[in-house]
């Protein structure tokens, strides 16, 4: 009996393809979607702390106010904004817009700048509103 799989071509994978902006943004969209699961647990934890009493709520707020806590919250904010922008991009594709190669590449590059900028704006407005 012969091995029929030896004559078949290898399936393409990340080691074969050259990374392009649209591919990287697709991967980042999946990663940020996964990160949002973790971040939503943090939001639920904060809400549970708010309902549990002043002492526990103050402790959770202190924890989120530490340097590490702020880094995690900043990352969650960026993941939320980046995933939202990726979702809007996918919605445009679902409606049949933005398939041109040069436009899709520009949009992928713009998403990096836009998500970082919007995250910074959200944090600056949040600090000014305090």
Image (tube, rainbow, N blue to C red):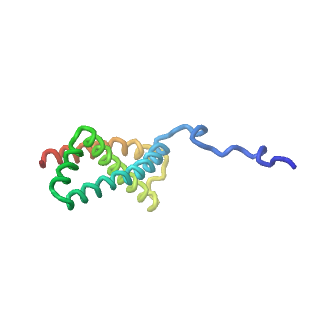
Closer-to-camera residue (62/81): 62
Total residue callouts = 0
Is 105 or 54 nearer to us in this picture? 54
Does residue 75 lie above or below 90 as drawn?
above
Res. 114 image quadrant: top left
Observer-nearest residue: 45 or 126? 45
Residue sitting at x 20%, y 53%: 56
Q: Residue furthest right?
A: 1
User: Residue drawn 78% across and 44% down?
Assistant: 7
Q: Position of residue 54 (x, y in %)?
A: 15, 56
Viewer-proximal residue, 23 or 2? 2
Residue that appears at 26% across and 43% down: 69
x, y percent for residue 32: 40, 49
Q: Is residue 101 left or right of residue 80?
A: right
2 sits to left or right of 111: right
Residue in the picture at 43% in, 47% down? 31
- Position in image of residue 64 (x %, y %): 23, 46
Q: Quadrant of residue 10?
A: top right
Percent x, y for residue 34? 42, 51
């Amino acid at each position: 009996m012969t091995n029929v799989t030896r004559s078949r071509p290898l399936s393409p994978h990340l080691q074969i393809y050259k990374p392009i902006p649209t591919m990287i943004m697709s991967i980042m969209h999946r990663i940020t979607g996964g990160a949002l699961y973790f971040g939503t647990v943090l939001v639920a934890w904060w809400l549970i702390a708010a309902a549990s009493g002043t002492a526990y709520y103050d402790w959770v707020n202190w924890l989120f106010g530490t340097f590490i806590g702020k880094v995690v919250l900043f990352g969650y904010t960026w993941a939320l904004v980046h995933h939202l922008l990726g979702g809007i991009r996918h919605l445009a594709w679902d409606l049949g817009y933005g398939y041109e190669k040069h436009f899709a590449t520009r949009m992928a590059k713009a998403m990096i700048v836009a998500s970082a900028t919007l995250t910074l704006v959200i944090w600056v407005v949040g600090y000014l509103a305090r």
